[in-house]
Each structure stands twice: as structure tokens, then as C-alpha cells.
């Protein structure tokens, strides 16, 4: 199931990543798949992606087929 997050303005990328990890681990809200079993019973273990503008207004795209909560390598935001 896809989730999209949008942040405008100067936003610390780490906060967005942390919130996305919580969402993928099903630790933020209930939905139809975990009403009986509770939070954390429906992991969003598919891949993930991130796109943002760097300080030169160039798009940086980072994507992975690994679940974000398992993908420590690709969720590092490079400093530009």
C-alpha cells in the first residue's frame, strides 16, 4: 500500500525519514488490516522512495526495493 508524504519549506529530512519509518512499521494509525491485531500487525515492507530539491534546486531521487525500516544504507540523506 503506497503512502505519500509532502513537506514544504525548510524541513529536517531526518524527521521525515523517522516519521516514514514509524508509518511503515504501523506505529502511527489504525487501518482495516490491524483492527483486530493492533498496531504493528501490518508492516509496510515494500520498497520506498524519496525526492527532494537540493540547495541548487536540482532534484535528488533516492529509491530502494528494501523496506525503509530495514534499509539503513539508502535512507541516509547526502549533504549538498
Image (spheres, helix red, strand yellow):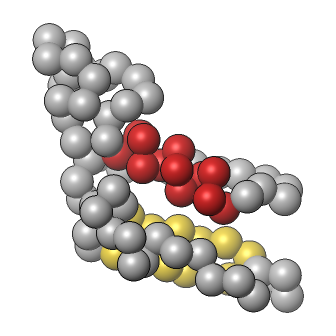
Residue 63 or 26: which is nearer the viewer?
Answer: 26
Residue 64 is situated, as x and y percent measured from the top left of the image, at: 34, 75
Quadrant placement of the C terminus: bottom right
Q: Position of residue 1 (x, y in %)?
A: 29, 46
Left or right of 33 in this view: 29: right
Q: Which of the 4 image quarters holds residue 68?
A: bottom left
Q: Quadrant of residue 67?
A: bottom left
Q: For this rendering, which residue is in front, 44 or 2?
A: 44
**Residue 63 visible in rendering:** no
In the displayed structure image, the side of residue 17 where residue 7 appears, left or right: right
49 relative to 28, above or below: below
Residue found 84% across the figure and 59% down from its top: 10
Does 50 sit above or below residue 58? above
Residue 5, horizontal then vertical, whole percent: 57, 49
Q: Is residue 63 left or right of residue 59?
A: left
Q: Residue furthest left?
A: 37
Q: Residue at x 42, y 49 (%)?
A: 21
Residue 75, position as x, y percentages in the image: 47, 71
Considering every residue shown, the one lying at the far front of the view is 72
Amino acid at each position: 500500500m503506497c503512502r505519500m508524504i509532502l513537506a514544504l519549506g525548510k524541513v529536517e529530512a531526518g524527521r521525515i525519514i523517522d516519521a516514514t519509518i514509524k508509518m511503515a512499521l504501523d506505529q502511527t494509525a489504525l487501518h482495516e488490516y490491524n483492527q483486530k491485531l493492533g498496531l504493528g500487525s501490518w508492516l509496510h515492507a515494500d520498497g520506498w522512495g524519496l525526492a527532494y530539491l537540493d540547495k541548487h534546486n536540482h532534484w535528488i531521487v533516492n529509491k530502494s526495493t528494501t523496506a525503509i525500516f530495514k534499509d539503513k544504507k539508502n535512507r541516509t540523506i547526502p549533504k549538498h
